[in-house]
Image: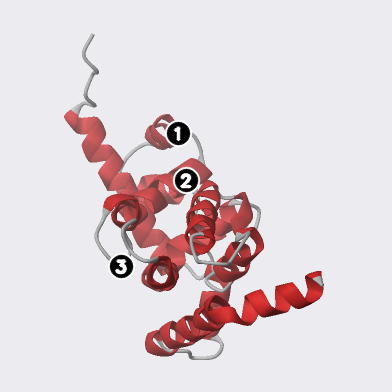
């Protein structure tokens, strides 16, 4: 049997809910203060619509995050340089991190909400494993780099949503400064410093 398409009203409701959640998270000082009831009221739908469509609050946040992140993930999976799989790893690794940093700068409220939905840690969020596995694979394609597991974790820690929020709000860091400092940090790791230190400790 052919797969049934969602009804037009269900699609409209889903889009309205995601847009409402996005607005509320952007306006809120703390994402945890935004409830399902708040989102339902903002979207003009009943709470039952939210629970039927997304399961729970975490499911709604995850769906919104995935919707916003999908263009970047698609570019990583099969896009052109500098994010796509045909890019040399020394160019692709910093490009992946820069894209992730820019996403979190553009969607700070949403990224914080997702990390908080994972019990205050990004490591409990499903998307983290995807980014880690992708970055690890790119690092391990670098000649002589070896196991990229820990390095991928360390680099992703530099673009945690709570760190980005702290640097922007508390330290007044500009977008340009954060991108430049992340690029410099990544370059130091990729161009031998990390490998040299790891080899010294292993010896």
Q: Position of residue 118 (x, y in %)?
A: 61, 51
At horizontal 49% and vertical 86% (from top left) the residue drawn is 184
SS assignment at label 2: helix
- Residue 141's tag is none
Depth order, front residue of 105/90: 90
> Considering only order in the chain, which callout, 1 or 3, is on the residue closer to the N terminus?
1
User: In the image, residue 121 lies at what x, y percent?
Assistant: 64, 58
Residue 123 located left or right of residue 110: right
Does residue 18 sit above or below 150 in this rendering?
A: above
Instruction: Judge depth for marks 2 and 3 and give the one in front.
Output: 3
Residue beneath label 2, please? 36
> Which SS class for mark 3?
loop
Which sits earlier in the primary sequence, circle 2 or circle 1?
2
Q: How far from the left and from the top, in percent, is residue 129?
A: 55, 50
Q: State which quadrant residue 93 falls in.
A: bottom left
Q: Nearer the viewer, residue 6 or 50?
A: 6
N-terminal of the pair, mark 2 or mark 3, is 2
- Residue beneath label 1, please? 51
Looking at the image, do the residues carrying marks 2 and 3 touch, with CB atoms under 8 Å apart? no
Mark 1 Cα shell of 10 Å, populated few (<14), some (14-19), many (≥20): some
Label 2 – label 1 distance at C-alpha: 9 Å
The quadrant in which the N terminus is found is top left
- Please name the residue shown 57% across and 75% down the image: 163
Residue at 37% x, 48% y is 41
Q: Are marks 2 and 1 in contact (CB under 8 Å)?
A: yes
Q: Which residue is mark 3?
A: 82
Identity of the residue drawn at 27% across and 46% down: 16
Q: Is residue 59 left or right of residue 13?
A: right
């Amino acid at each position: 049997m052919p797969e049934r398409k969602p009804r037009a009203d269900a699609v409209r409701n889903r889009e309205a809910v995601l847009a409402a959640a996005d607005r509320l998270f952007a306006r809120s000082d703390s994402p945890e203060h935004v409830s399902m009831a708040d989102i339902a009221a903002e979207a003009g739908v009943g709470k039952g619509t939210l629970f039927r469509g997304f399961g729970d609050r975490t499911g709604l946040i995850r769906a919104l995050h995935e919707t916003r992140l999908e263009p970047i993930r698609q570019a990583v999976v099969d896009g052109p340089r500098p994010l796509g799989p045909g890019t040399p790893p020394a160019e692709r690794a910093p490009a992946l991190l820069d894209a992730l940093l820019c996403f979190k700068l553009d969607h700070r409220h949403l990224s914080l909400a997702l990390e908080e939905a994972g019990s205050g840690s990004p490591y409990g969020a499903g998307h983290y494993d995807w980014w880690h596995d992708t970055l690890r694979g790119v690092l391990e394609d670098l000649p002589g780099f070896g196991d990229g597991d820990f390095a991928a974790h360390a680099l992703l820690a530099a673009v945690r949503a709570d760190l980005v929020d702290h640097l922007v709000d508390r330290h007044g860091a500009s977008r340009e400064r954060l991108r430049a400092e992340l690029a410099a940090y990544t370059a130091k790791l990729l161009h031998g410093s990390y490998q040299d230190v790891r080899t010294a400790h292993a010896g």
